[in-house]
Image (cartoon, grey):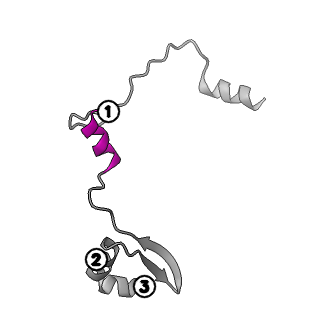
């Protein structure tokens, strides 16, 4: 269902209800489709929530810390490596 941006903004609730009901809404600007709004199926959780629920991942509520990486210092500098790679 193509609809202009102005019409979409003016009747946002109606078009979101259409998308929720399974009918995609195509938003157009100057008669060119620029976006498509589709509904999210009931019970479709995020992938991360599914992993946490299944026990494959854990989260303690804090910010991710990343891996701890240590460099041994035996290699040369980055600039020397770049010059070497350039030939």
Between residue 86 and residue 54, name the one nearer to us.
Answer: 54
Q: Is residue 16 left or right of residue 85?
A: left
Alpha-carbon span between mark 1 and mark 2:
35 Å
Q: How many marks?
A: 3
Identified at 33% across, 82% down, the residue is: 9
Q: Earlier in the sequence, mark 2 or mark 3?
A: 3
Quadrant for the C terminus in the image: top right
- Disc 3, SS: strand
Callout 1 crowding tier (Cα within 10 Å): few <14, some 14–19, many ≥20:
few
Q: Earlier in the sequence, mark 1 or mark 2?
A: 2
Give the foreground label among 2 and 3: 2
Q: Which residue is mark 1?
A: 56
- Magenta range is 46-56
Q: Is residue 61 above or below residue 79?
A: below
Query: Residue 67, which numbered label?
Result: none
Between residue 77 and residue 57, name the one nearer to us.
Answer: 57
Identified at 42% across, 85% down, the residue is: 3
Alpha-carbon span between mark 1 and mark 3:
42 Å
Between residue 14 and residue 41, name the one nearer to us.
Answer: 41
Q: Earlier in the sequence, mark 1 or mark 3?
A: 3
Residue 59 lies, in percent from the top left, at 25, 35
Q: Is residue 45 above or below residue 11?
A: above
Quadrant for the N terminus in the image: bottom left
Query: Residue 17, which numbered label?
Result: 2
Query: Residue 3, which numbered label?
Result: 3
């Amino acid at each position: 269902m193509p609809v202009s941006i102005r019409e979409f903004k003016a009747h946002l609730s109606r078009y979101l209800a259409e998308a929720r009901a399974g009918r995609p809404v195509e938003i157009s600007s100057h008669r060119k489709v620029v976006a498509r709004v589709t509904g999210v199926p009931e019970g479709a959780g995020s992938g991360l929530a599914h992993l946490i629920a299944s026990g494959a991942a854990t989260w303690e509520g804090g910010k991710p810390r990343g891996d701890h990486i240590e460099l041994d210092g035996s290699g040369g500098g980055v600039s020397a490596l770049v010059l070497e790679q350039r030939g």
